[in-house]
Image: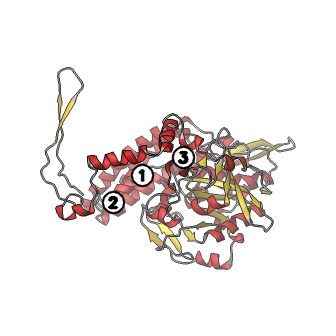
């Protein structure tokens, strides 16, 4: 690496124009293997001759010129969608949960997929029990409390790291400061919110413009949180007492709470839920608090304490049959720690099949955009024939473990499984996926995922413990290995 001492750029305006000249004084260069004479034999320099050879190699194949003419005008994804893969794909399944969720949910311009998927799974047993044609939990309710709790979680971690003399410009602090108010999250983080703050029907706390587009609010929160991180570090360095630091965090949280309340509205401390069932009969629940609503009307049919989070992390450093957690991954101080039970993809796939057969949807995390047709709602390894144009394998040149190691793949989205198709030997062929991007995307909001895609790009599922073997359940009791905060297993919370 060539290192350059930090200097201040000098801007010189020229007359009334908008041009700028940049004068940068380079004080010292540290030679790297790329430029050191003794390493030059190991390096390829893109000389004029080399570049001319690359162009000649490109030009000599007429297919390259044809492809260039086409793909400088049309999109790759649509044009390279395999006719056979599209033709042979349908959204029909021989096993589906009943009922499926209505209406199709839409997270809009946010990263709240983990909350939407959680609530989409939780609403199905409620719809069955209360004979509802349509139902949604309030996503804004949980998101409100996630913003508040996550601010407090971050501030407490800043104190902890300041006390351990973690450098501000080190990798850990840089990572946490960058993502101090991200929309993303994990299953166990949703459980923390539900157990502490309960659930609310959507009709009792609707979305707001800032819950459907979180950018502006998050920018404001990040600005204050980074300012407060500096203040708390200064207090620690000045040997402030624990009591003084706690009082200061309370003051900071008053500001954070005010920002979130102004942007999202304030959730109801209690509410009355009125609805019509399938028979058009009027029904009423309440007045009731959100926690009471979860405990009395949801938990008997959907108990978050009975759910186990399984992951498929095939990296050699992380053996199957062990548990893992990610450092500083969470949202509630003193809340449940995120625990990953690492299992083979075959164990995970069977747990998903058994859950769907048991009429239970399955929350999962995956790398959604790989081999994905958003328009048709297809996830299939054979979907895009990039090799026909580029003459090389795309996306599958690395193993699943290598993709994690080389940052080619990680969890980017959470959804739920609601169906599966089994062949004559009872093996899964494809899965039905309920998304949260509205019914105008994919196939009316649903995706079909092939078995092969599942194996390569699915990383995490949450199933009820009754669908797991005693061996898998015993793994849950092991002390988890702590992965660094930036590990890809925590990426869904970014």
N-term-proximal mark, 2 vs 3: 3
Q: In the rendering, at what x and y percent does residue 390 appear?
A: 49, 49
Q: 10 Å neighbourhood of mark 2: few (<14), some, or many (≥20)?
A: few
284 on left or right of 110? right
Residue at the location (53% across, 57% down)? 411
Mark 2 → mark 1, Cα distance in angstroms: 12 Å
442 on left or right of 226? right
Q: Circle 3 sits on which residue?
A: 144
N-term-proximal mark, 2 vs 1: 2
Front-most of residues 435 and 227: 435
Residue at the location (51% across, 44% down)? 63
Q: 10 Å neighbourhood of mark 3: few (<14), some, or many (≥20)?
A: many
Is residue 13 in sight in this rendering?
A: yes
Q: In the rendering, at what x and y percent does residue 55 appear?
A: 37, 44
Q: Locate the N terminus by quadrant.
A: bottom left
Mark 2 → mark 3, Cα distance in angstroms: 29 Å
354 on left or right of 44? right
Q: Circle 1 sits on which residue?
A: 179
Helix, strand or loop for disc 2: helix
N-term-proximal mark, 3 vs 1: 3
Which quarter of the picture shows residue 367? bottom right
Q: 10 Å neighbourhood of mark 1: few (<14), some, or many (≥20)?
A: some
Disc sitting over residue 171 in the figure:
2
């Amino acid at each position: 690496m060539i290192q350059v001492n930090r200097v201040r750029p000098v801007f010189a305006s020229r007359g009334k124009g908008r041009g700028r000249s940049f004068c940068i004084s380079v004080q010292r260069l540290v030679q790297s293997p790329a430029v050191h004479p003794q390493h030059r034999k190991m390096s390829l320099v893109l000389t004029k001759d080399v570049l001319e050879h690359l162009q000649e190699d490109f030009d000599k194949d007429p297919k390259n010129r044809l492809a260039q003419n086409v793909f400088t005008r049309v999109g790759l994804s649509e044009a390279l969608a395999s006719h056979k893969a599209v033709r042979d794909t349908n959204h029909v399944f021989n096993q589906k949960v009943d009922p499926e969720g209505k209406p199709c949910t839409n997270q809009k311009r946010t990263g709240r997929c983990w909350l939407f998927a959680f609530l989409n799974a939780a609403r199905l047993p409620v719809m069955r029990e209360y004979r509802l044609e349509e139902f949604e939990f309030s996503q804004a309710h949980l998101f409100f409390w996630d913003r508040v709790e996550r601010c407090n979680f971050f501030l407490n971690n800043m104190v902890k790291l300041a006390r351990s003399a973690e450098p501000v410009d080190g990798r850990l602090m840089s990572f946490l400061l960058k993502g101090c108010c991200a929309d993303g999250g994990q299953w166990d983080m949703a459980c923390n919110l539900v157990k502490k703050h309960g659930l609310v029907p959507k009709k009792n706390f609707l979305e707001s413009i800032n819950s459907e587009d979180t950018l502006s609010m998050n920018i404001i929160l990040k600005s204050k949180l980074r300012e407060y991180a500096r203040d708390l570090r200064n207090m620690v360095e000045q040997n402030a007492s624990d009591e003084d630091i706690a009082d200061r965090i309370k003051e900071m949280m008053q500001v954070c709470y005010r920002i979130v309340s102004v942007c999202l509205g304030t959730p109801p401390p209690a509410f009355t839920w009125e609805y019509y069932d399938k028979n058009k009969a009027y029904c009423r629940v309440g007045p009731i608090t959100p926690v009471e609503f979860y405990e009395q009307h949801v938990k008997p049919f959907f108990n978050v304490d009975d759910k186990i989070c399984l992951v498929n992390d095939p990296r050699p450093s992380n053996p199957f049959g062990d548990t893992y957690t990610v450092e500083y991954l969470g949202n509630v101080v003193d809340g449940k720690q995120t625990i990953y039970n690492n299992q083979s993809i075959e164990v995970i796939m069977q747990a998903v099949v058994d859950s769907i057969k048991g009429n239970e949807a399955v929350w999962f995390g995956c790398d959604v955009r790989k081999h994905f047709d958003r328009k048709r709602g297809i996830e299939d390894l054979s979907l895009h024939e990039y090799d026909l144009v580029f003459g090389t394998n795309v996306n599958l040149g690395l193993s699943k473990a290598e993709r994690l190691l080389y940052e080619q793949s990680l969890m980017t989205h959470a959804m739920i499984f609601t169906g599966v198709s089994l062949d004559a030997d009872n093996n899964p062929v494809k899965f039905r996926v309920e998304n949260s991007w509205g019914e105008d995307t994919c196939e009316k909001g649903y995706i079909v995922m092939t078995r092969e895609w599942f194996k390569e790009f699915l990383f995490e599922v949450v199933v009820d413990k009754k669908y797991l073997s005693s061996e898998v359940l015993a793994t849950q009791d092991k002390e988890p290995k702590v992965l660094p905060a930036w590990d890809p297993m925590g990426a869904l919370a970014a």
